[in-house]
Image (spheres, coloured by chain):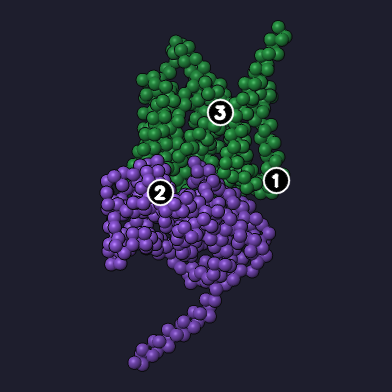
Amino acid sequence: MSGLARLKGWEGLLLALLIVVIALNVSYSPYFLGVGNIVNLFQLSIEKIIVALMMALIIINAEIDLSVASVMGLGACTMAFLFQAGAPMPAAILAGLAAGGVAGAINGFWVAYVGLPSLAVTLAGLIGFRGVARILIEDRAVGGFPRWFNDLGQQPLVGPLTLSIIVFVLMFAVVAVILHRSAFGRLVYVIGNNLQAARFSGVRVARKKMALFVASGLVAAFAGILYAARLGSVRGDTAEGFELDIITIVLLGGVSIFGGAGNIAGVGLSILLILSLRNGMGLANITGNTQTSVIGALLILSVLAPNIAQMIGNKWKGREA
Amino acid sequence: MRKYLLASAAVALLGLTGAASAEPVTATPGKDLKMVLLPKFLGIAVFDQAHTGAQEAQKELQNPSEVQFLGPTPENSVAGQIEIVTNATTQGVAAIMLSNNSGDQIAPAAKAAQEKGIKVVTWDSPIPSGEGEDVFVAQVDFTETGKVMADMALSILGEDGGEFAILSASPDAANQNSWIAAMEAALKDPKYANLKQVDLVYGNDQSEESYNQALALVDKHPGLELIMSPTTVGIAAAAKAMQDEGLCDKVKISGLGLPAEMVAYTMNGCAPEFALWSFVDLGYLSYYTAYLLATDALKAEEGAQFTAGRMGDYTITKDPTRDNGLRILMGPFSVYNKDNVEAAAK
């Protein structure tokens, strides 16, 4: 399929919506196109969209990771706990990442080697990893990190771009290559499409799934640490509830919840669409439940639209025959 | 003697110069300033009352820009507050009035706002580190909370005293814990000697749990005459429990409550007296503070004095509850009884 033909489908719809939203934002707010605002637009949700890239791989593989937000909290809390206990910051950061990797490996073990559904396993992870994070930090807020750490989260690194934004761009490129240009990526689709077929054709399914969950844990912990740097402090509830936004972005991007379908371009467009919409509404002083409702309505439409389109398409075909 | 005279002369001089420079500043009405009132989250009655108070101040000061009442949803409170502060910074508003629900996590966003010349006034709940905040408008003094509760207990139980128990929110609610500690400290005064605290239980700010805890207290302590609940959820649930079980003649309820939720219980005698600060006044005072700071009439520094319309004069002091931070203490409590609760409940 040529690039142009593909654009007629889901990505085309997202692109059209994106153009409408951007046009509305530009006409409504003189601030929207400012460099500072565009940086803020990404920066305010940067940790979520970093994790969303990894989530896309997991969902295409016909699994889900509901524990990502709790692992973000776990990574940040492990780091903060060790830092407060006197560990040097770099060691605390590495330990935070390691905690994320271990959390991912626990998820991966039950899903890949025991064969439990990831919905159940990672739901348990959502509760359990958050519990550990809360035990580590209790009801406190841990801050006072070294200046360089906070600066990495809050100050531009290259031009107006922050470290987190650079990480996101690099990760987007890496995920795009893995998913669409590598053997591993093809297997992710194959497993997502038909697990049995993949097994019978000798794909080492368990290893692939394990690798994906460990990577998801690592990326989530890394994002949690970036979040800690951006806010300058960590609490037991850091990143709580983020999983819904993250999964939402991926599904709106056209990745099928049943696995096997979707691509990185769609996820990228979905990210731009949701962030522009949020930012535009924020600049128009639309907040709270109204903002949530508008984004909710968009999602309902986005889930319904393709199904309705297909139904109409099927009827049409039926008539022709 | 001479030393004493000199010293008193110096004190007098200091007093004089102090008085001269500390003339409370007043607001010049009619400036067009965009100001954001940011509650912990939307949909809570007391924050709507603060909004009403801020609107009153805005009209009084003839600021043509409406108060922008923007808040996150409860489940997105931290990230939502940061987002609203950041977007307000992009728009270059004059002032942000924040009831902080994000601890120190809001500090980088608030500092970025300050760097753009935006005044950040916190109210109801401050930024713990004081970073990114010009001044905190505190509703009441925690010590005073304890004394007000002790006084209400005394007024209900009378000189002869009696047994009372406390029904609090959760065991780790910082504000309730300090209020209870302040009450226990206040009770050491001999005039409260006949008041006997027999228990302290937690209803976790859940209506049903608080309701059951209140009934359990009555069962456990046959001599109980009063339940003090320093939380609006607990006091209403306890009053309902006593009313439902027909216990109001025996056990009274008091503490911190919302007039609108308590009016029925106060009128039927279950909760003859309770207290709260006025959130309308808190919104009004916060708006005046922010307006004065944004027009450069007032500097956020220790000792600065200003007039806040109908509420009178206030002074900025160091905040004794934080290591770093300035405070304006609003106070006092409004104590509600059957004479004034109906008007307040409207």
On what subunit does the disc labeled 3 rest?
A
Q: Amino acid at mark 1?
A: Tyr
Alpha carbon distance from label 1 to label 3:
28 Å
Tell me if mark 3 has few (under 14), some (14-19) or many (20+) residues whose alpha carbon lies within 10 angstroms of its own: many
Q: Are marks 1 and 2 in contact (CB under 8 Å)?
A: no
Sequence-first tag of 1 and 3: 1
Residue closest to the eye, B130 or B344: B344
On what subunit does the disc labeled 2 rest?
B
What kind of element bears circle 2?
A: helix
What kind of element bears circle 3?
A: helix
x and y percentages locating residue A179 in the rendered image: 53, 25
x and y percentages locating residue A37 in the rendered image: 61, 47
Q: Residue at x 63, y 29 (%)?
A: A301
Location of mark 3 (residue): A251
Q: Disc 1 or disc 2, which is closer to the eye?
A: 2
For the N terminus of chain B, the quadrant is bottom left
Question: Relative to residue A32, is residue A5 depicted above or below?
Answer: above
Tell me if mark 1 has few (under 14), some (14-19) or many (20+) residues whose alpha carbon lies within 10 angstroms of its own: some
- Residue reaching furthest bottom? B2
Q: Report whether residue B122 is seen.
A: no
Location of mark 1 (residue): A28
Alpha carbon distance from label 2 to label 3:
48 Å
Q: Colour of chain B?
A: purple
Residue closest to the eye, A83 or A185: A83
Q: Which mark is residue A309?
A: none
Left or right: residue B245 compared with residue A254: left
Q: Amino acid at mark 3?
A: Leu
Q: Which mark is residue B239?
A: 2
